[in-house]
Image (spheres, rainbow, N blue to C red):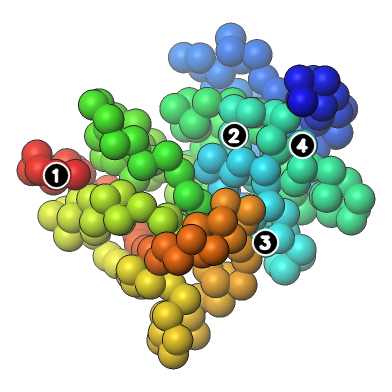
Amino acid sequence: MAKHKIKHFSEFGSFDFTFEPDFKEFFQADYHLKGKWNEQVFKNNNPIVLELGCGKGEYATNLALQNPNKNFIGIDIKGNRMWKGASIAFEKKLSNIAFIRTQIEFVDSFFSKNEIEEIWITFPDPQLKKCRNKKRLTSTLFLKKYIKFLTPEGFINLKTDNTVLYDYTLELLNKNGLKINISTNDLYKESNPDLIKLSEASSIKTYYEKKYLEKGEKIKFIQFKLSNKNIEEPEPSEY
């Protein structure tokens, strides 16, 4: 197993659409491709969609296959996992996808104002332990980072199996009056009208999502917009 991880990690870094910046390249500084992803990487002006915590890269890769007129970037810290998506992208000769191996905490060092049109957060760690509100990818800490580079009309998609994370995110959005386009606590429920509004949320299933569904767990989904207002955390509770 260890040999496979090392091999995958090495191969991941060999693709010309994968990036593994050194810590000093983005810590308290702007990464050299910030504001230049379309110009220098994708060579077009198509909208850029970001997947945070992309894991094996399945979601970003499938989105890239379905949407050739958009560009996609997957971010995760584990290169041996992203190797899967990068390998598929290489085999299918996709030119509209890239992967960055880095910590999501520094995401605002990689993208400039209005550079990202849409964000996908697919099955993130719900962070149920202490300091959770500083680590959840839908917390105020992270939402304030996203607003720096998300377009005014851009939106964020959260897909999760975790009820606590789903309820926490809804509470945060409602407390701050942020616009919720779609929310459902059972994405695959028969005749769910939300599926008609956003087929991408249900047409792509990751490895882990299939495992959750096999166990009979319900998949939750929220699509929402940000605003420049000051965002506050919900009151302390079971979240």
Numbered badge on residue 76 = 2
Hey, what amino acid is under mark 4?
A: Trp
Measured in 3D between alpha carbons, the distance from the residue under mark 4 to the one under mark 1, in whole angstroms, is: 37 Å
**Front one among 102 and 7:** 7
Hey, what amino acid is under mark 3?
A: Leu
Contact, mark 1 vs mark 2 (Cβ under 8 Å): no
Whole-percent x and y of residue 221?
Answer: 40, 64
Numbered badge on residue 238 = 1
Residue 68 falls left or right of residue 103: right
Residue 167 image-quadrant placement: bottom left
As drawn, which residue projects farthest toward the top?
24
The residue where tag 3 is placed is 63
Q: Dividing the image into 4 quarters, which one contains the N terminus?
A: top right
Mark positioned earlier in the residue sequence (4 or 2): 2
Whole-percent x and y of residue 182?
Answer: 36, 72
Whole-percent x and y of residue 124?
Answer: 45, 44
Measured in 3D between alpha carbons, the distance from the residue under mark 3 to the one under mark 4, in whole angstroms, is: 17 Å
The residue where tag 4 is placed is 83
